[in-house]
Image (cartoon, helix red, strand yellow):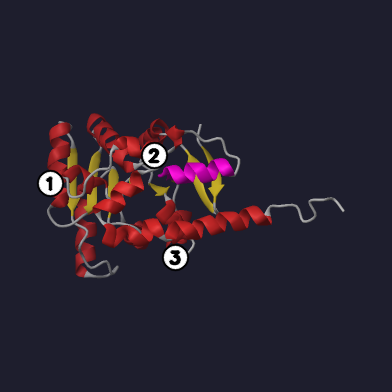
Amino acid sequence: MSHSISILGAQVDAITIDELHQVITDTVRTNQQKVIANHNLHSLYLYHHDPVMREFYSHANCVHIDGMPLLLFARMAGHSLRAVHRVTYADWFPKLVGAAAQRQWRVFYLGSKPGVGERGAAILRQRNPGLEMAVAHGYFNMHKDSAENRSVLHQINSFSPHLLMIGMGMPRQEHWALQNLDRIQANVILNSGAAMDYVAGEIPTPPRWSGQIGAEWLFRLASDPCRLWRRYLLEPWMLVWLLLWQRLRSLPANPTGR
Protein backbone atom coordinates (compact mmCIF):
# COMPACT_ATOMS: atom_id res chain seq x y z
CA MET A 1 0.00 0.00 0.00
CA SER A 2 1.18 3.49 -0.81
CA HIS A 3 1.78 6.07 1.89
CA SER A 4 2.70 9.74 1.97
CA ILE A 5 6.09 11.01 3.14
CA SER A 6 7.90 14.34 3.17
CA ILE A 7 11.05 14.93 1.12
CA LEU A 8 12.70 18.31 1.64
CA GLY A 9 9.40 19.81 2.69
CA ALA A 10 7.35 18.42 -0.21
CA GLN A 11 4.82 15.62 0.15
CA VAL A 12 5.21 12.58 -2.11
CA ASP A 13 3.58 9.16 -2.22
CA ALA A 14 5.56 5.94 -1.96
CA ILE A 15 3.63 4.31 -4.79
CA THR A 16 4.41 1.75 -7.50
CA ILE A 17 3.29 1.55 -11.13
CA ASP A 18 0.72 -1.14 -10.31
CA GLU A 19 -0.70 0.98 -7.49
CA LEU A 20 -0.87 4.03 -9.77
CA HIS A 21 -2.79 2.00 -12.35
CA GLN A 22 -5.24 1.00 -9.64
CA VAL A 23 -5.73 4.66 -8.63
CA ILE A 24 -6.42 5.56 -12.26
CA THR A 25 -8.75 2.60 -12.77
CA ASP A 26 -10.77 3.49 -9.68
CA THR A 27 -10.93 7.16 -10.71
CA VAL A 28 -12.23 6.34 -14.20
CA ARG A 29 -14.66 3.70 -12.93
CA THR A 30 -16.23 6.10 -10.43
CA ASN A 31 -16.11 9.04 -12.86
CA GLN A 32 -14.11 11.26 -10.51
CA GLN A 33 -11.38 13.74 -11.35
CA LYS A 34 -7.88 13.42 -9.89
CA VAL A 35 -4.52 15.08 -10.49
CA ILE A 36 -1.54 12.73 -10.55
CA ALA A 37 1.71 14.68 -10.30
CA ASN A 38 5.34 13.76 -9.82
CA HIS A 39 8.44 15.14 -8.15
CA ASN A 40 12.05 15.09 -9.30
CA LEU A 41 15.01 17.31 -8.41
CA HIS A 42 13.92 20.05 -10.83
CA SER A 43 10.35 20.15 -9.52
CA LEU A 44 11.60 20.25 -5.92
CA TYR A 45 13.74 23.25 -6.80
CA LEU A 46 10.75 24.95 -8.44
CA TYR A 47 8.54 23.99 -5.50
CA HIS A 48 10.74 26.08 -3.21
CA HIS A 49 10.94 29.04 -5.63
CA ASP A 50 7.54 29.22 -7.33
CA PRO A 51 4.33 29.71 -5.29
CA VAL A 52 2.20 28.62 -8.26
CA MET A 53 3.99 25.28 -8.29
CA ARG A 54 3.30 24.85 -4.58
CA GLU A 55 -0.37 25.57 -5.19
CA PHE A 56 -0.47 23.05 -8.05
CA TYR A 57 0.94 20.33 -5.81
CA SER A 58 -1.58 21.19 -3.12
CA HIS A 59 -4.29 20.16 -5.63
CA ALA A 60 -2.58 16.88 -6.54
CA ASN A 61 -4.29 13.75 -5.29
CA CYS A 62 -1.19 11.63 -5.79
CA VAL A 63 2.48 12.60 -6.27
CA HIS A 64 4.81 9.82 -7.39
CA ILE A 65 8.61 9.89 -7.19
CA ASP A 66 10.44 10.48 -10.48
CA GLY A 67 14.18 10.20 -9.93
CA MET A 68 16.68 8.12 -8.00
CA PRO A 69 18.04 11.15 -6.06
CA LEU A 70 14.65 11.52 -4.36
CA LEU A 71 14.82 7.90 -3.24
CA LEU A 72 18.24 8.68 -1.78
CA PHE A 73 16.91 11.76 0.04
CA ALA A 74 13.99 9.70 1.37
CA ARG A 75 16.32 6.97 2.66
CA MET A 76 18.52 9.57 4.34
CA ALA A 77 15.40 10.79 6.12
CA GLY A 78 14.73 7.28 7.39
CA HIS A 79 12.11 6.09 4.89
CA SER A 80 12.55 2.55 3.61
CA LEU A 81 11.73 3.06 -0.07
CA ARG A 82 12.73 0.67 -2.85
CA ALA A 83 13.52 1.09 -6.54
CA VAL A 84 9.91 0.18 -7.44
CA HIS A 85 8.83 3.44 -5.79
CA ARG A 86 10.59 5.38 -8.53
CA VAL A 87 8.09 5.85 -11.36
CA THR A 88 9.57 7.77 -14.28
CA TYR A 89 7.64 8.41 -17.48
CA ALA A 90 10.34 6.91 -19.66
CA ASP A 91 9.44 3.55 -18.10
CA TRP A 92 5.80 4.18 -17.18
CA PHE A 93 4.43 5.89 -20.30
CA PRO A 94 4.41 2.80 -22.58
CA LYS A 95 2.74 0.73 -19.83
CA LEU A 96 0.16 3.41 -19.12
CA VAL A 97 -0.74 3.78 -22.80
CA GLY A 98 -0.93 0.00 -23.12
CA ALA A 99 -3.34 -0.13 -20.17
CA ALA A 100 -5.40 2.67 -21.75
CA ALA A 101 -5.74 0.73 -25.01
CA GLN A 102 -6.66 -2.46 -23.18
CA ARG A 103 -9.27 -0.76 -21.00
CA GLN A 104 -10.58 1.55 -23.74
CA TRP A 105 -9.57 4.76 -21.99
CA ARG A 106 -9.49 7.81 -24.24
CA VAL A 107 -6.17 9.66 -23.97
CA PHE A 108 -5.57 13.31 -24.88
CA TYR A 109 -1.97 14.51 -25.10
CA LEU A 110 -1.31 18.26 -24.89
CA GLY A 111 2.26 19.31 -25.49
CA SER A 112 5.43 19.14 -27.57
CA LYS A 113 6.19 21.10 -30.74
CA PRO A 114 3.69 21.08 -33.62
CA GLY A 115 3.78 17.71 -35.36
CA VAL A 116 5.62 15.85 -32.61
CA GLY A 117 2.51 14.74 -30.75
CA GLU A 118 0.93 13.45 -33.96
CA ARG A 119 4.09 11.49 -34.79
CA GLY A 120 4.25 10.00 -31.31
CA ALA A 121 0.53 9.17 -31.28
CA ALA A 122 0.87 7.31 -34.61
CA ILE A 123 3.67 5.19 -33.12
CA LEU A 124 1.64 4.47 -30.00
CA ARG A 125 -1.44 3.49 -32.02
CA GLN A 126 0.67 1.10 -34.05
CA ARG A 127 2.04 -0.49 -30.89
CA ASN A 128 -1.34 -0.55 -29.14
CA PRO A 129 -4.19 -1.44 -31.52
CA GLY A 130 -7.46 0.14 -30.49
CA LEU A 131 -5.83 3.07 -28.69
CA GLU A 132 -8.01 6.20 -28.78
CA MET A 133 -5.65 9.17 -28.61
CA ALA A 134 -6.01 12.80 -29.65
CA VAL A 135 -3.26 15.42 -29.51
CA ALA A 136 -2.70 19.17 -29.55
CA HIS A 137 0.67 20.91 -29.54
CA GLY A 138 1.83 22.97 -26.57
CA TYR A 139 2.78 26.15 -28.44
CA PHE A 140 -0.22 28.39 -27.83
CA ASN A 141 -1.18 31.49 -25.86
CA MET A 142 -1.64 30.18 -22.32
CA HIS A 143 -3.57 33.21 -21.06
CA LYS A 144 -6.73 31.84 -19.48
CA ASP A 145 -9.10 33.93 -21.61
CA SER A 146 -7.18 33.85 -24.89
CA ALA A 147 -8.88 32.45 -28.00
CA GLU A 148 -6.12 29.84 -28.36
CA ASN A 149 -6.54 28.63 -24.80
CA ARG A 150 -10.30 28.38 -25.20
CA SER A 151 -9.77 26.42 -28.42
CA VAL A 152 -7.45 23.96 -26.65
CA LEU A 153 -9.97 23.44 -23.87
CA HIS A 154 -12.72 22.90 -26.44
CA GLN A 155 -10.62 20.23 -28.19
CA ILE A 156 -9.97 18.45 -24.91
CA ASN A 157 -13.51 18.59 -23.61
CA SER A 158 -15.03 17.58 -26.96
CA PHE A 159 -12.88 14.44 -26.87
CA SER A 160 -13.89 13.82 -23.23
CA PRO A 161 -10.68 11.99 -22.31
CA HIS A 162 -10.27 9.61 -19.42
CA LEU A 163 -6.59 10.64 -19.29
CA LEU A 164 -5.22 14.11 -20.04
CA MET A 165 -1.44 14.12 -20.30
CA ILE A 166 0.19 17.55 -20.31
CA GLY A 167 3.73 17.60 -21.68
CA MET A 168 4.80 21.24 -21.83
CA GLY A 169 7.73 21.11 -19.43
CA MET A 170 8.00 22.38 -15.87
CA PRO A 171 6.63 24.75 -14.68
CA ARG A 172 4.54 25.66 -17.77
CA GLN A 173 2.48 22.47 -17.72
CA GLU A 174 1.67 22.82 -14.00
CA HIS A 175 0.78 26.51 -14.37
CA TRP A 176 -1.59 25.70 -17.23
CA ALA A 177 -3.21 22.78 -15.41
CA LEU A 178 -3.77 24.84 -12.27
CA GLN A 179 -5.36 27.85 -13.98
CA ASN A 180 -7.68 25.64 -16.07
CA LEU A 181 -8.46 22.91 -13.55
CA ASP A 182 -12.07 23.97 -13.11
CA ARG A 183 -12.66 23.92 -16.89
CA ILE A 184 -11.01 20.61 -17.80
CA GLN A 185 -13.33 17.66 -18.39
CA ALA A 186 -11.07 14.66 -17.85
CA ASN A 187 -10.91 11.99 -15.19
CA VAL A 188 -7.15 11.93 -14.65
CA ILE A 189 -4.78 14.84 -15.26
CA LEU A 190 -1.06 14.07 -15.44
CA ASN A 191 1.99 16.30 -15.90
CA SER A 192 3.98 14.08 -18.27
CA GLY A 193 6.94 16.24 -19.30
CA ALA A 194 8.92 14.96 -22.29
CA ALA A 195 7.30 11.52 -22.43
CA MET A 196 5.88 11.97 -25.94
CA ASP A 197 9.10 13.56 -27.21
CA TYR A 198 10.91 10.32 -26.35
CA VAL A 199 8.31 8.19 -28.13
CA ALA A 200 8.43 10.37 -31.24
CA GLY A 201 12.24 10.39 -31.31
CA GLU A 202 12.33 14.16 -30.88
CA ILE A 203 14.89 13.72 -28.11
CA PRO A 204 16.98 10.59 -27.44
CA THR A 205 15.82 8.28 -24.67
CA PRO A 206 18.56 7.64 -22.07
CA PRO A 207 19.54 3.98 -21.66
CA ARG A 208 17.16 2.45 -19.14
CA TRP A 209 20.02 1.03 -17.04
CA SER A 210 21.24 4.59 -16.41
CA GLY A 211 18.14 5.41 -14.38
CA GLN A 212 18.78 2.56 -11.96
CA ILE A 213 22.18 3.97 -11.03
CA GLY A 214 21.14 7.63 -10.97
CA ALA A 215 23.07 8.57 -14.12
CA GLU A 216 20.14 9.35 -16.44
CA TRP A 217 20.75 13.07 -16.03
CA LEU A 218 24.17 12.77 -17.70
CA PHE A 219 22.60 11.53 -20.92
CA ARG A 220 19.94 14.23 -20.85
CA LEU A 221 22.53 16.93 -20.19
CA ALA A 222 24.69 15.70 -23.05
CA SER A 223 21.72 15.73 -25.44
CA ASP A 224 20.71 19.35 -24.65
CA PRO A 225 23.41 21.13 -22.62
CA CYS A 226 22.33 24.70 -23.45
CA ARG A 227 18.86 24.17 -22.00
CA LEU A 228 19.62 21.76 -19.17
CA TRP A 229 22.97 22.83 -17.69
CA ARG A 230 21.40 24.99 -14.99
CA ARG A 231 18.89 22.27 -14.03
CA TYR A 232 21.50 19.57 -13.56
CA LEU A 233 24.60 21.50 -12.51
CA LEU A 234 23.26 24.31 -10.29
CA GLU A 235 19.79 23.52 -8.95
CA PRO A 236 20.75 20.30 -7.10
CA TRP A 237 23.23 22.21 -4.91
CA MET A 238 20.41 24.33 -3.52
CA LEU A 239 18.62 21.12 -2.55
CA VAL A 240 21.77 19.73 -0.94
CA TRP A 241 22.05 22.87 1.19
CA LEU A 242 18.37 22.55 2.10
CA LEU A 243 18.95 18.94 3.14
CA LEU A 244 21.97 19.90 5.26
CA TRP A 245 20.02 22.72 6.89
CA GLN A 246 17.18 20.36 7.78
CA ARG A 247 19.64 17.85 9.23
CA LEU A 248 21.35 20.55 11.31
CA ARG A 249 18.00 21.77 12.65
CA SER A 250 17.11 18.23 13.69
CA LEU A 251 20.25 17.82 15.82
CA PRO A 252 19.80 17.99 19.62
CA ALA A 253 20.36 21.45 21.04
CA ASN A 254 22.79 20.07 23.66
CA PRO A 255 24.13 16.73 22.37
CA THR A 256 26.60 16.35 25.27
CA GLY A 257 23.79 16.49 27.87
CA ARG A 258 25.67 19.17 29.88
Q: Nearer the viewer, residue 154 or 123?
A: 123
Instruction: Measure how far apart labels 2 and 3 are at the Cα level.
Output: 24 Å
Mark 2 surroundings: few (<14), some (14-19) or many (≥20) residues within 10 A = many
Please, what is the three-letter code of the amino acid marked with disc 3? Answer: Asp
Q: In the figure, residue 127 lies in which quadrant?
A: top left
Residue ID at (37%, 43%): 215
Q: CA distance from mark 2 to mark 1?
A: 24 Å
Badge 3 is on which residue?
Answer: 50
* Residue 176 against residue 82 in the figure, above or below: below
- Tell me where the magenta segment starts and ends, as one range: 63-76
- Determine the residue positioned at 24% across, 58% down: 153
Give x and y (percent) for residue 7: 53, 49
Q: Look at the numbered discs 2 and 3 and tell me whether their residues touch, using CB distance below 8 Å.
A: no
Above or below for 123 versus 175: above
> Callout 1: helix, strand or loop?
helix
Q: Is residue 175 left or right of residue 168?
A: right
Gap between marks 1 and 3, in whole Å? 33 Å
Q: Nearer the viewer, residue 121 or 22?
A: 121
Q: Quadrant of residue 200?
A: top left
- As drawn, the label of residue 119 is 1
Tell whether position 70 is magenta.
yes
| Residue depicted at x 23% and y 64% | 149
Given the image, on which type of amino acid does mark 2 rest? Val
| Residue in the picture at 52% in, 36% down | 81
Q: What secondary structure is found at the residue carrying circle 3?
A: loop
Q: Which mark is on residue 87?
A: 2
Q: Is residue 1 magenta?
A: no
Q: Residues within 10 Å of mark 1 (few under 14, many from 20)?
A: some
Position in image of residue 94 (x %, y %): 26, 36
Task: Report the label total.
Answer: 3
Q: Position of residue 148 (x, y in %)?
A: 19, 66
In the rendered image, residue 193, in percent from the top left (x then y), is placed at 30, 51
